[in-house]
Amino acid sequence: MAPPPVQGLQARVGLDGRLLGHFPYGEAPTADLVAIAPGVQLHRDAAAALLRLQDAAAADGIDLRVLSAYRSIDLQKQIFFDVKSERNQSALERAQVSAPPGFSEHSTGYAVDLGDGRAPDTNLSASFESTPAFAWLQAHANRFHFTLSFQAGNAQGVNYEPWHWRFEGSAEALKTFEAAQRLNR
């Protein structure tokens, strides 16, 4: 039997490549990343689309805020293991709300967590779904090639995350998320 893919995590990869519900994702090459805010980066294709999306939302009176974007695998490792420890969670419990390192859409540079600037108390919470920002995203995000990654009851078994959107507006991005798209059809 192959060793676990993540040091310190005893879970094994399933037949479809998923670890605790999450598909494996590589890290975006540094040359493909651009700054969208101080200390916040996205893949250049996703960044351009996100800026257009934010501009359109603003024109409609919606204040979309970027809460998180690209995360290196090392940063994801810290987030996964440190928060798991702080919250006294098992790996399975933690994986329902945060991907193990090497299995996060954020590492691709195509995923972004969004919030409503007028309702910051809903940030990274299921209550984000009740905001005008989420309603606007549901109505308009596809025009900018963004799709909700983890809908309620998704086949991956990951908790519903109304704030987590991924860019699928290039052949490279579509290929990156093909396995997740197939599973959730």
Image (cartoon, helix red, strand yellow):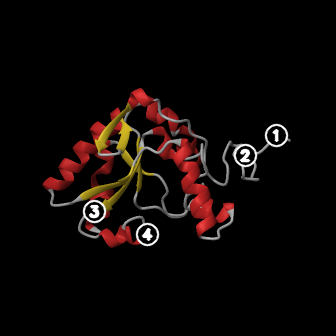
Give the image location of residue 76, x and y in percent.
54, 49
Q: Is residue 1 left or right of residue 179?
A: right
Residue that carries the numbered disc 4 in the rendered image: 126
Give the image location of residue 25, x and y in percent.
56, 39
Q: Is residue 103 above or below residue 89?
A: above
| Callout 1 touching callout 2 (CB < 8 Å) | yes
Q: Is residue 84 left or right of residue 58?
A: right
Residue that carries the numbered disc 2 in the rendered image: 13
Give the image location of residue 41, x and y in percent.
36, 41
Query: Spatial distance from mark 4 to mark 2, Cα to Cα?
Result: 28 Å
Residue that carries the numbered disc 3 in the rendered image: 133
Q: Which mark is residue 80?
A: none
Q: Determine if residue 157 is in view.
A: no
Query: Spatial distance from mark 1 to mark 3, Cα to Cα?
Result: 44 Å
**Three-letter amino acid code at disc 2?**
Val
Which residue does the image show at 25% across and 63% down from the upper left?
117
Q: Is residue 7 above or below residue 27?
A: below
Which badge, 1 or 3, comes first in the chain's sequence? 1
Q: Secondary structure at mark 3?
A: helix
**Three-letter amino acid code at disc 3?**
Ala
Which badge, 1 or 2, comes first in the chain's sequence? 1
